[in-house]
Image (cartoon, helix red, strand yellow):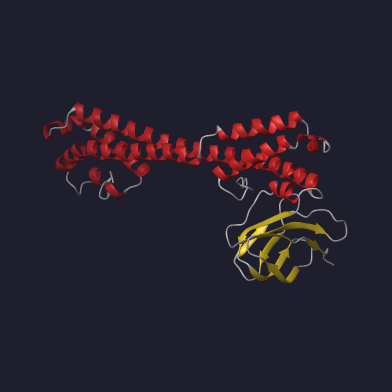
Amino acid sequence: MIKAATRKCKMSDPDFVQKCDIIAVFCLRDIIKFKLYGFEEADQARFLANILAFKELESDEYYEGLKMEKTRDKSDSRAALLLAMAPVRDRVKLKFGEQSAIYRSLRLSEITKASDEDLYFAAKRLHKVAFTKKTLLADKGLTDAMLTALLNAIKAHDDAIDLVETAVSEREQQTEIRINMANSLYAELVMICEIGKSAWVNESEAKYNDYRIYEPAAGKCILTGKATDGKTSAPVAKVMVELEEYDTVVETDENGNYLIVDADPGVVTLLADADGYDPYRKPDLHLLADKTIVENIILTPAG
């Protein structure tokens, strides 16, 4: 099974786009500094183009709206199909009797509760029987117009079912595209912010802080850091990181970074677990309100 794309940015799309716009302004302001790290005007232009491309994507709400519209159409087609079935069904029942093999073979006793697909097949069975027996049913008032109306309603319902499935598939595909584009743009944002912080770390605290991606909510704390191998110092991905006191679990990314947003302040115990490493435990970690706490994790290889 293919694993669904997972969004890496821990903020809403509007906040994410706004943060990208702000960082782009700071990056342009500090382009001389950035050139010392191999980041040129062309890299700045690419970042701006990627922000614009992401902005131009339709939102998930747009595709959800299309799906809901097609679902309403399917509901209408279902009601129309039941309406078209009724006069044909009644004439088969009158002609052959409710307990006859012909009528029972149609399986219409609880048709209003049937799934859309089961309703479609039941309507096809009804049309086939009525069309085959239309000469016998003529004396009960069955007409070609009734059969034509039923056939048209069957097709309309079948088409409506297909359109809903298409809308669902389109929404899933577009959601994946949006997540992948957001992740790519987020990786650029992180890289730019790392350069910006490195450029100003020893010169300006204010400008260093310009390149912080996350700010804790009022009264909350951000906890972040990197998990590395204790022997090789290489970053370790897919480490499960959690706070023992709270129901908060995150996973390190491919660079070993983890991020816990809006943690409650207090004294906590940080736990980490990864295949091939001993369990990690850091007690008495102080989380301070309105602060970003950096706590790196050094893992000891098992055995």
Quadrant in the rendering for residue 167: top left
**Residue placed at 54% from the left, 37% from the top?**
174
Residue toward you, 110 or 232: 232
**Residue placed at 58% from the left, 57% from the top?**
217
Residue toward you, 176 or 15: 15
Quarter the C terminus occupies: bottom right
Quadrant in the rendering for residue 124: top left
Image-based side of 168 in relation to 108, left or right: right
Residue toward you, 235 or 275: 235
**Residue placed at 70% from the left, 30% from the top?**
46
Residue 65 location (% of width, % of height): 42, 39
Q: Is residue 150 above or below residue 212?
A: above
**Residue placed at 64% from the left, 70% from the top?**
266
| Residue found farthest to the right | 231
Image-based side of 59 in relation to 279, left or right: left
Residue 11 location (% of width, % of height): 58, 49
- How many circles with numbers are drawn on the protein? 0
Residue 117 location (% of width, % of height): 37, 42
Residue 121 location (% of width, % of height): 34, 40
Residue toward you, 205 or 252: 205
